[in-house]
Amino acid sequence: MDLGIAGRKAIVCAASKGLGRACAMSLAREGVDLVITARTPGPLEQTADEIRSATGVSVKTVASDITTEEGRAAVLAACPEPDILVNNAGGPPPGDFREWRREHWIAAIDANMITPIEMIRATVDSMMQRGFGRIVNITSSSVKAPIEVLGLSNGARSGLHGFIAGLARKTVKHNVTINNLLPGPFETERLRRNFYHVAQVKGITVEQAREMRRKENPSGRLGDPAEFGDACAFLCSAQMGYVTAQNFLMDGGAYPGTY
Ligand code: NAP
């Protein structure tokens, strides 16, 4: 299927690795020109080279922290009027809420709620004026089914979802959709760090921790980031103009509810 977005411009935040990288690659395969970001220049340049040579699209890089005002300004200077915006950033650390102080909550809300809202604020009006826009926020399955040790993520990301539910119904009339893409366990560096943490806590090997996670998923496997990237590209397609304010869960069936 031709997704009808060749020649469009996208900003993909936090995209040198993992899910952000996969979204960038899938959009590039559809002929979308990219601006990709991450804090560390080396892996960012490497990813940009890999995407260019796999797809031939234009890929600009901006090495900056997307959770800061300066970081966002640098990205927006490189691409002031994107047609597609994929919001992403690192997730908050695990822990016990008794140890979290105001500054921990502010950091989580800043990174996982206010950063995507600021990126949307800077781009959505011009999308509406031009009559096309696709915004995808990478969040987490923890918004639907809270993960006990990820209280900062459960809380901060839910705030974003609440805001999006209102805004996304104001923009769709102008062919600008805003949807959330909720990953369950996808095999990325972040998930591997989690296995390491679980292995230490439970006194097992990292491979045993990975096997536990794999087996407990109804699909019997972990997600492949490429699957996530393709779903993101589809949400950004011309065909998806009638789908907005949705929370699209990709978790191999782990969420046990009927709805
Ligand atoms: P990952 O493999 O660790 O990749 C994270 C990417 O984001 C890297 O390119 C990293 O590069 C960049 N990044 C992190 N913080 C940044 C910042 N402040 N500014 C700019 N770039 C930043 O992580 P992932 O697994 O793809 O996870 C992506 C998001 O999905 C996270 O919020 C995570 O919590 C969420 N999630 C993931 C899973 C999963 O199973 N993988 C499940 C649920 C939710 P630099 O470090 O160089 O900046």
Image (spheres, rainbow, N blue to C red):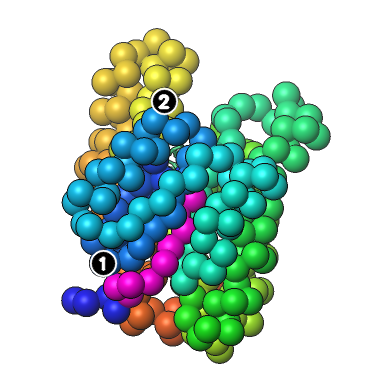
Q: Secondary structure at mark 1?
A: loop
Q: Is residue 158 left or right of residue 218?
A: right
Residue type pointed to by label 2: Arg
The one nearer the camera, 69 or 230, is 69
- What is the CA distance from the residue labelled 1 to the residue labelled 2? 31 Å
Q: Which label number is shown at residue 30?
A: 1
Work out whether residue 153 can be spotted: no
The disc placed on residue 103 is none
Q: Is mark 1 within 8 Å of ligand 1?
A: no
Asked whether, in this view, residue 33 is left or right of residue 41, the answer is left
Is 6 a magenta residue? yes
Crowding at dot 1, Cα within 10 Å, few <14 / some 14-19 / many 20+, comes out as many
Quarter of the figure with the N terminus: bottom left
Residue at the (27%, 49%) spot, across then down: 51
Q: Quadrant of residue 99?
A: top right
Q: Residue at x 55, y 87 (%)?
A: 174
Counting other residues with Cα less than 10 Å from the Cα at mark 2, is it few (<14), some (14-19), or many (20 or more)? few
- Residue found at the very far bottom of the displayed protein: 173
Report which residue position mark 2 lands on.
193
Viewer-nearest residue: 31 or 101: 31
Is residue 246 left or right of 168 when viewed as pictured?
A: left
Q: Picture coordinates of residue 112 (x, y %)? A: 61, 48
Q: Is mark 2 within 8 Å of ligand 1?
A: yes
Q: Position of residue 26 (x, y in %)?
A: 28, 58
Local secondary structure at mark 2: helix
Give the mark nearest the N terminus, 1 or 2. Answer: 1
Please state which amino acid type lies under the numbered disc 1. Answer: Glu
- Region of the chain picked out in magenta, as a range: 5-13
